[in-house]
Amino acid sequence: MKEKTEQELNTFIEEWKGPNTKNRESFLHFKEYLAKKEAVVLDFIARPGLTYSLRAVHAEQKEKDLFVMVDVIEDVERWLSVCFFGNMITDPEERGDFVPGGLLGEDAVCFDLEEEDDSLLRYIETRLDEAYQSAAGQ
């Protein structure tokens, strides 16, 4: 991650306050989970008032600009939407929402975390692993 981008991300995390910090903890969890993966490059794009996007790309990935986008959605309370390209993961329990053209113009599967949900968090981790493996081969 570029130094300026990392500073923006760190400032965003430090300034994230409010009654529901569980979503902040989930965001940090996904950031750390992705950062530990070999050959993953993270990027952060802030659109204040709309979304704050943590994006992960595999260094060997050629066809797509990312394999997952972890969005913090600005609302009354911040919540997370974790989106994958539909052809890079499975969703055997159908816990995600299919979004036509929802990720950089391509079909996506997104998982929304509006409150603490350890079961969904673990389920998303499995999807992260799938997308990571899929990205390595693209």
Image (cartoon, grey):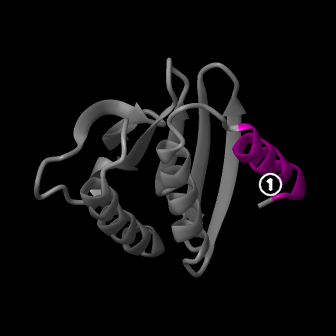
In-image side of 127 versus 56 (left or right) = left
* Label tally: 1
Q: Residue at x 65, y 60 (%)?
A: 42
Which of the 4 image quarters holds residue 47? top right
In-image side of 42 versus 3 (left or right) = left
Q: Is residue 65 visible?
A: no
Q: Residue furthest front?
A: 19
Q: What span is in magenta? A: 2-15
Q: Which residue is mark 1?
A: 6
The amino acid type of the residue labelled 1 equals Glu
Of the pair 107 and 63, the residue shown nearer to us: 107
Of the pair 19 and 47, the residue shown nearer to us: 19
Q: Is residue 15 above or below residue 32?
A: above
Of the pair 65 and 28, the residue shown nearer to us: 28
Q: Residue at x 75, y 38 (%)?
A: 15
Q: Position of residue 81 (x, y in %)?
A: 42, 39
Q: Quadrant of the N terminus?
A: bottom right
Any magenta on residue 4? yes
Which of the 4 image quarters holds residue 114? top left
Q: Residue at x 65, y 19 (%)?
A: 49
Q: Position of residue 127 (x, y in %)?
A: 31, 62
Any magenta on residue 123? no
Which of the 4 image quarters holds residue 3? bottom right
Q: Residue furthest bottom?
A: 38
Q: Quadrant of the C terminus?
A: bottom left
Predominant SS along the magenta part: helix
Q: Position of residue 14 (x, y in %)?
A: 75, 45
In-image side of 84 versus 25 (left or right) = left
Q: Is residue 12 visible?
A: yes
Q: Is residue 92 above or below residue 9?
A: below
Q: Residue furthest right?
A: 4
Secondary structure beneath dot 1 equals helix
